[in-house]
Amino acid sequence: AVVADYSPNRPDYDSTEHWIAELDGTPIGWICCWPVVDELEETEIWFPLGVNETAAGIDYLLGRPLDGPTNRGRGIGSSMLRAFTSDIVFGRHADWTQAAAGPYTANVPSWRALEKAGFTNVGSVRGPCTVMVINRPDSTH
């Protein structure tokens, strides 16, 4: 049933890949990626800022545990982003030359985590969002 429900052969197939991030076997967050050309209503305004049409868009959420210390401010978000871009975005998708994210400009912890993970601020767009990009390490883009 899973293959049938999520098959890329379905006419309504969504190319977004959803992942659960774990720390020591405990779910701590959600992160996803998609080809930016598949979500132009969101990403087309990123292109004038230097985001390539061969980029992956990413979105993420770092969860708060029901008990125990918060996951914020401990470097967990930047570690999650760094591992995801390396292992999933660039590790599984040879054709993606960049990863890009557009967190709300007011969400300073989010874009700081992206910076710590190696992303660069390339500008702002409506929302207002701060567009952050990391290039594939072996890419000239």
Image (cartoon, grey):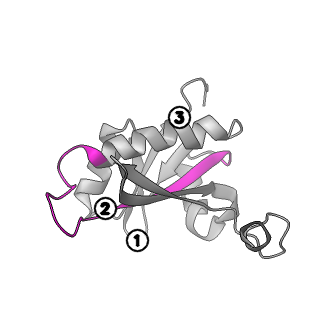
Number of the label disc, if any, that sits on residue 127: 1
Q: Residue at x 50, y 49 (%)?
A: 100
Closer to the eye: label 1 or 3: 3
Q: Quadrant of residue 109?
A: bottom left
For the residues labelled 2 and 1, say whether their Cβ atoms are less than 8 Å apart. Answer: yes
Q: Amino acid at mark 1?
A: Gly
Q: Which mark is residue 105?
A: 2
Question: What's the residue at 62%, 57% (across, down)?
Answer: 34
Horizontal relation, residue 22 to residue 3: left or right: left
Start-end of magenta stretch: 53-76
User: Compared with residue 15, is residue 47 higher up or lower down, i.e. above or below?
Assistant: above
Q: Which residue is mark 3?
A: 135
Give how far across and how far down residue 116 sits, in percent: 30, 38
Q: Quadrant of residue 10?
A: bottom right
Q: Secondary structure at mark 2?
A: loop
Residue 122 rendering spot, x and y as whole percentages: 43, 45
**In the rendered structure, does residue 69 fall within the stretch colored magenta?**
yes
Disc on res. 141: none
Which three-letter amino acid code belongs to the residue tagged 3? Asn
